[in-house]
Image: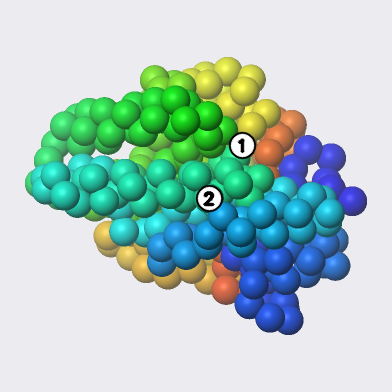
Amino acid sequence: MPSKYLLFGTGGIPRSTTGTSSVSGIKRIRELDLDCMELEFVQGVRMGEKGAKNVLEAAKKEEVALSVHAPYYINLNSYEEEKLKASLERIYQAARIGSLCGAESIVLHAGFYQKSSKKYTFDNISKALKELTGQLRDEGIPAVLRPETMGKRTQFGTLEEVLALSAEIEGIMPCIDFCHLHAREGKENSYSEFTKILSRVEESLGKEGLSNMHIHVAGVEYGMNGEKRHLNLKESDFNYPELMKVLREFKARGRIILESPVLEEDALMLKKLYNEI
């Protein structure tokens, strides 16, 4: 059964899946008694319309909620027009095929500051996303684009930046990656800090911000410049028990996608922990 407010699942197909297809992964999610799965289009959108139809049918049958992670090769602050256009096209295709799979939320890494100021970068990314959300609306593609909070300081994606985009543009909502927030500055890892994060979400986006959350969680190794790599939760310093407590207290709704190396083990552990609070 799904948890009271939050759905728990994996980024990509569970490790214990027999086979490598998304349909096999969806069936395995149901066998494990998890609730959702993120389709990983991170190396490119390689699924066609026929494959998307099969995924949609499997997800409906197994009652597994889907989302999509768009390709990594995106920079909406690129100085080169060709790279910007290619980035927008990759997100567009992820949204188009994702929506045919029944996935509404499309997670994306928005870009890099490069040599730009933070304001200039924000304005560039905002302009690109306004254009893209307008195109999706015009074509009747029911996708919500979710810029992710990012773990390296060179990357656009502080909590403030992601919330500001979400407040400003219709069709944009945040993907809050708590391990990235922690890795970026080595902070954001306590009950009071998690409380502040959820309070800021509510201040920026109102009740919808808390009732339609998309969360990524993993352990994380980090250094001076932020995130280095994902770890299993129990091998990291990430304070996941306090995060579960705060999410429960705020009655946050939506889904939690686990991205640690053991995927379903950590997803099942978090779901159990959350349900016991």
In percent of the image, x 53 and y 21: which residue is there?
205
Q: Secondary structure at mark 1?
A: strand
State the count of labels: 2
Q: Is residue 219 left or right of residue 251?
A: left
Residue 57 position by quadrant: bottom right
Which quarter of the figure has residue 250?
top right
Mark 1 neighbour class, 10 Å CA radius: few under 14, some 14 to 19, many 20 or more? some
Question: Residue 20 location, x and y as percent?
Answer: 63, 77
Instruction: Tell me the tag on residue 97.
Output: 2
Amino acid identity at mark 2:
Ile
154 or 208: nearer the viewer:
208
Label 1 belongs to which residue? 213
Q: Position of residue 238 (x, y in %)?
A: 56, 59
- Extreme right residue here? 1
* Horizontal side, residue 221 vs residue 244: left or right: left
In the image, what residue type sits under mark 1? Met
